[in-house]
Image (cartoon, rainbow, N blue to C red):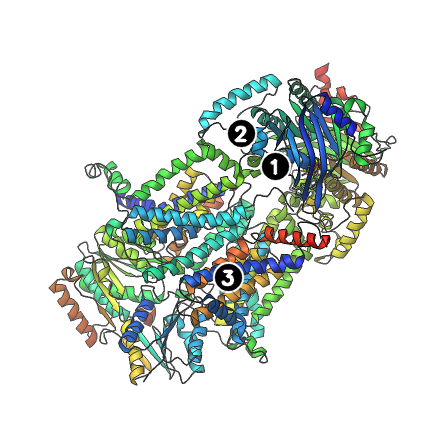
Amino acid sequence: MLDVIILVLDSTLRLSTPLLFACLAGLFSERSGIVDIGLEGKMLGGAFAAGAVAYWTQDPWLGLLAAIFVSVLLALIHGFASITNRGNQVVAGVAINFLAAGLTVLLGQAWFAQGGRTPQLDMDWRFSPITLPFAESIQNVPFIGPIYADLLSGHNILVYAAFVAVPLTWWVVFRTRFGLRLRAVGESPQAVDTAGISVAWLRYRAVIICGALCGFAGAYLAIAQSAGFIKDMSAGKGFIALAALIFAKWKPVNAMFACLLFGFLDAVANLMQGQSIPGVGEVPVQFFQALPYILTVVLLAGFIGRAIPPKASGIPYVKERT
Amino acid sequence: ETIKPAVVYDFGGRNDRSFNEAAFNGAQEFKERTGINYRDFEIQNPSQREQALRNFARRGMDPIITIGFAQAAALEKVAKEFPDTRFAIVDSVVDLPNVRSIVFREEQGSYLVGMLAAMASETDTISFVGGMDIPLIRKFSCGYKQGAKAVNPDIEIIENMTGTTGAAWTDPVKGGELARSQFARDSDVVFHAAGATGMGVLQAAADEGKLGIGVDSNQNHLHPGQILTSMVKAVDVAVDATLTDAQEGNWSTGVQVMGLAENGVSWALDDNNADLINDEMKAAVEAAKQDIVSGKVEVHDFMVDNTCPF
Amino acid sequence: MTISLDNQSVREASTHGVAAIELKGINKSFGPVHANKDIDLVVGKGSIHGIVGENGAGKSTLMSILYGFYTADTGDIIVDGKTVKIPDSKTAIEVGIGMVHQHFMLVDPFTVVENVMLGAEGGAMLSEGIARVRKELGRLADEYDMKIDLDAVVGELPVGLQQRVEILKALYRGADILILDEPTGVLTPAEADHLFRILRVLRDEGKTILLITHKLREIMDVTDQVSVMRRGEMVASRKTAETSMSELAELMVGRSVLLEVNKQPAQPKDALLKVANLNVKDDRGVMRVKNVSLEVKAGEILGIAGVSGNGQSELLKALSGITRAETGSMELVGNTIDLTKNHSSSDFRELGMSHVPEDRHRMGLVNAFSEYENSILGYHREQKYSNGMLLNVSGIREEAKERMEKYDIRPRDTELKAAKFSGGNQQKIVLAREIECDPDVLLIGQPTRGVDIGAIEYIHKRIIEMRDAGKAVLLVSVELDEIRSLADRILVMFDGNVVGERGPDATEQELGLLMAGVTDEAAE
Amino acid sequence: MSKGQLPRWVDFGLLPAINLIAAFLVSGLVVILIGENPLEAVKWLVWGALGYGEGVGFTLFYATNFIFTGLAVAVAFHAGLFNIGGEGQAYVGGLGVALACLAMDQFVPWYVTLPMAIIGGAAFGAGWAFIPAYLQAKRGSHIVITTIMFNFIASSLMVYLLANVLRPTGSMQPSTRGFEEGGQLPLLRHLFPAFDLGQSPVNLALFVALIACVLVWVLIWRTKLGYEIRTFGANPNAAVYAGISPVRITVVTMLISGALAGLMGINEVMGAQARLLLDFTAGYGFVGIAVALMGRGHPIGIILASILFGMLYQGGAELAFEIPTITRDMIVVIQALVILFAGALEHMFRPAVVAFFDRFAGAKAVA
Ligand SMILES: Nc1ncnc2c1ncn2[C@@H]1O[C@H](COP(=O)(O)OP(=O)(O)OP(=O)(O)O)[C@@H](O)[C@H]1O
Ligand SMILES: Nc1ncnc2c1ncn2[C@@H]1O[C@H](COP(=O)(O)OP(=O)(O)OP(=O)(O)O)[C@@H](O)[C@H]1O
Ligand SMILES: [Mg+2]
Ligand SMILES: [Mg+2]
């Protein structure tokens, strides 16, 4: 039984990681008042850059940097549209998603001629699993051993980074000057403005952080979890991350639990698929595939209550209305 | 004779790591060999199927090959409008005098790799990752199971499908995750029929020191020594042959069934996996192949009755 | 009389003391609206300088320019003798200007400390600044008698305290020049008095204060100098000691204004509204109205006085069907209604009740809608506005146009968005709608909050007319003057209870004590 | 005309045109990058979309889809609800249309089937929107999440039904059987042979869509319900003050929104494909978000935005067809740039244009 649990939880960690990066990314953006349905596109753009650069340089770290760079670039487009030009943030997000979907394949095809894929990466051009200290020696200790060695140990560095990013985000948002201003600007940009702080620059910084974190998510997909970029490989994770963010009521620690929950539901669904349930018998696989989404809706209806977004989110900041 | 061939791919597109890509390779091969250029088109939504076929037909392209079962309805319409144009469809049957229908016996090839998987497995547990739960994929999985059970009736076979949206074919992360969850449940050989999602399946197998089985084209080279074999579905050969037939005046219509006998499906053996296949395995598979070709062994086709008894 | 810039007094102000602020030729347009036209203004150092003017005269705009929130199209700002450019609020803060905006610039979910430190954190880590803020706030609170719970969430504080936070924010930043835009609009007389005491202390310490208000009495009480704006222009500047309320009123409006309400004694008839045993909780589950029973007769105005936040808002919401009560029933024009059930406010409207809500922006109007669409809000289901399922748009426009004439709503444009009307005119739109439906019972909350004196005069007249037409009027207001001049009977609410009833001749002191919770029994 | 104001023709004509030109200029750069002639590309794009009858037909055909999904998003938006679930609602709506067609096509002519198909599509689409709407209204579950979830759930449901229940035995394809005559909408090329619409699938559903536009306009701006919807969307407090029930408005609006999305099935399922296909929605539901926002929630705007996107889809296909190096991904990039420049960056050129007009107007006044 323990090994089944560990198996599911292990899978949960891996599945939650990209969601968590993207979710925290969204947190920075939306806390600053910029609604972001472009997480998907930024992630995808980052994944492509990671795949391409990791292949060229044979170095995952440079791949990660490239992912961050590209993702931040997309974030800046989003920012330029919604901060500087006061455009519709949702439309900008939709545009980013389309742009990333199209450009990654277009450039991928032009550079590698593999149908938008990047060439397959060798083991050591990727982020590979890390064995935590003593994992082997305590492997056989009952209970603790498997949990440490099989569940906690043996992930790649980005998985750990994602979970380190949670307290870090919490600290930045709730314990630093930047965080205070970030929270303020999402609630009341006028208050920030009249306090002598530039609303635009603050929001740009939030959007840039959002891009950087999406870069991590993308790099994880392409050069940690997989061995290269594949067209559309973000496969809707940006939207799930967005859902997780709302679920988490825009709070970092909640975000972690929300992402873990989504990852867990997914992992369980993977495990349950094709197994017959006692008393019910064989259940169509589609049911299990839909299960995480159904459970999300049930949880949302039952336990979460109203999620109230930062008050100014989605509204471009204008002082003088004409 | 110079011909003006055209190819219409389905949703997955020219480079889907699956049958569309195989078709592309076939056309490419033909082009390199004969120097005859071809045109192609990747559809983006259902309405473009008809449109693309018609556009090619109008421009006098001939023959026109369409890839994928989903094109059948569109082809049926357009082929009637252009009775003098030669058409071919891969993976479905369109019963018209100017259409060649090419269907593959995926279950036969899958049967063979299923046998190999069962023989290679040390845990007596093997697995399958499909893209979407549609009849075509069931066809693969059913043959695979039958083959495995033929070797070891008690073998455990885990079966997973990736998703229900188009992303099911392009989600290597999910594919890898499904494979890992299968490995954790003791599977040590995994066969995928999931397009680009399968990249993640094979990667996971390589990462975890298990064996993967490729599909459609020979994927053994992707992780040398870690891919047991590939169930090759010779769409490329079929496309090349169809074009060649048209060029050389050997065009024929009707249904072309591409099974083991016709080398339409096969299992791949090359330098990359030579060490994984011992003589005993090789002998067993070759024997089974003969039995299937001769009709001594009947491989169940899921499509016949929509069930898989295994 | 001539209404032009009174150069004499300007020169006087600048020669008598040093000028803390000098504005020269300020112009500002918002699209087609020329909000400030060639404004000149001199504010003496260490003085309290009042600015008055009608709604939309451009007062807030001018102050926002001084504070760097808007930038002027042309013109110079001279602070302490030096010409400065104030492109943003940061610069304004740096040159020592602080501002309490008409609509507070606070972050609702933040605590008092967080709000005060925003923009003046004193280091990249919050922990560094927090202690300093607490200490400094403690000192300021003591010095100016401005106690406040530093860890309270600002959005949950009553407006009076929210304003205190705004003032503390400015003082914490070391403002020498403090701008207050309609600070007393939301305060009770006692709170306002307290504020003025603080302002005097600040002045005596040498700080300069700019005060915008619609209440001329406050101008007379507290300012040293007063400037008058009208339609974007600065029309006069006077020493307070040398002017009078009526002169100021005339300067503002451009005609003479009646500052007293003229009315005959009431002729009350049968009760049209009876409320028994009402208890109401707010959204957070706190009991805000406790055992209130009251009745309003036809032909009388019942005034509810009280410091804001003592249950008046919840009372109005429960009576108008917006929220459900815990206990209580109501008899409305002979119909008994159980207020503990869910009701729709339109049900009550059908029975003859209409309601001018306290907060026109949040409730009474849809800012994004045009004037004519706002003119049927709540009445849109009525027969006369519809053709079957459809709205009778031309009929509605027609009627809206008539009402604009009748109520002198400016500009006369039924297509203009509600947001584009000035506060007084917005209030008239709501009043016109709620009066013209010819109700039997009229609930009115804060009818003249933030409204200029010209409009107040008009609004008061209409309310009296309603009474004289035999309607029952329930008036809730935090303005004691208003209550005393309009109401025929006055109930005072404190902490959800009705703590006393008085006639219209009750003195301000008497009512003030009741409003502070000193009840008749306690006083004995 | 006063300072800072623009004449209507500039606001609604010149500015959008400048935005589009900017989008195409940037697209042109991408075209140059991949070594093709951008003018050539524009030529094929425009010709493909508008240059000949069949192209126009296809453009209108796609526009029909976008009108339905755009209206769906817009109606919800007027009530302040962000319905991201158009894709799922359209998918399930297609099921409703298909069931009506399957049940009736062998027995009655199309015009008898059509009303039932409309009811079926609308009812199923509305049904799929109902649970998110109800949960939002009663439990405060965020409608953005629930509608996203329902998109995924819809695709699971539809794969199951198409692969296991509705698929005729022996067919490889996860789809229903093809409909008979009685389940097929007449194509416009048959109805109006005078117009050369080539072989395009544009069909009677176009008129259903246009009627829907008129009805939506009447609903939103001329009915009491529409007044309540807009009030609730613009100021929920004022809505309660006016006696408008938030629960009722939320549910009713989402039902209408879902029904409109569901009607997309009339065009795709009953009109073009004459069968229910896997993934027939092909992302039209998501594009509907951009269409609705770019059309500013107004039916006229939505029609124009739909035609623009229809042109991009059809012209793009033609472009990809004619210039093989320009793949469908290039088309996606062009779409992205159009959404970016014409949608998100719509205000970018405004200040410059305003300045130009101010100076121009000023100069004239002096002269
Ligand atoms: N942000 C803005 N955008 C556009 N126009 C504005 C804006 N703020 C003010 N205006 C215009 O400028 C004029 C002056 O407004 P302002 O707020 O200065 O008036 P005010 O004197 O403060 O009025 P009140 O007494 O109602 O507060 C108004 O008539 C209004 O039309
Ligand atoms: N968005 C806007 N566009 C145009 N004019 C505006 C806008 N917002 C406010 N105004 C104008 O600014 C002036 C002042 O408005 P302000 O926001 O100070 O509220 P107000 O009218 O004083 O009402 P109150 O103080 O009761 O809230 C008004 O004349 C109003 O017409
Ligand atoms: Mg003001
Ligand atoms: Mg005001």
Residue B184 at least partly seen: no
The residue lying at 45 percent from left, 32 percent from top is: A176
Check the residue under mark 2 and report the chain it is in.
C
**Secondary structure at numbered mark 3:** helix
Under mark 3, the amino acid is Phe
Is A36 positioned to the left or the right of B247 in the image?
right
Report which residue position mark 3 lands on: D24
Residue B296 placement, left or right of D227 = left
Residue extending farthest to the left is B279
Ranked by sequence position, the earlier of labels 2 and 1 is 1
Dot label at residue C69: 1
Task: For label 2, count other residues whose C-alpha is less than 10 Å away and answer few (under 14), some (14-19) or many (20+).
Answer: many
Which of the 4 image quarters holds residue A285?
bottom left
Camera-nearest residue between B117 and D82: D82
> Where A158 sits versus C507, above or below?
below
The type of residue carrying mark 2 is: Thr
**Residue at screen point 32% across, 82% down:** B246
Question: For the view shown, which residue lies furthest in the top direction?
Answer: C524
Q: Secondary structure at mark 2?
A: loop
Whether the residues at callouts 2 and 1 have beta carbons within 8 Å, the answer is no
Toward the viewer: D288 or D33? Answer: D33
Residue at x-position 50% and y-position 41%:
A203
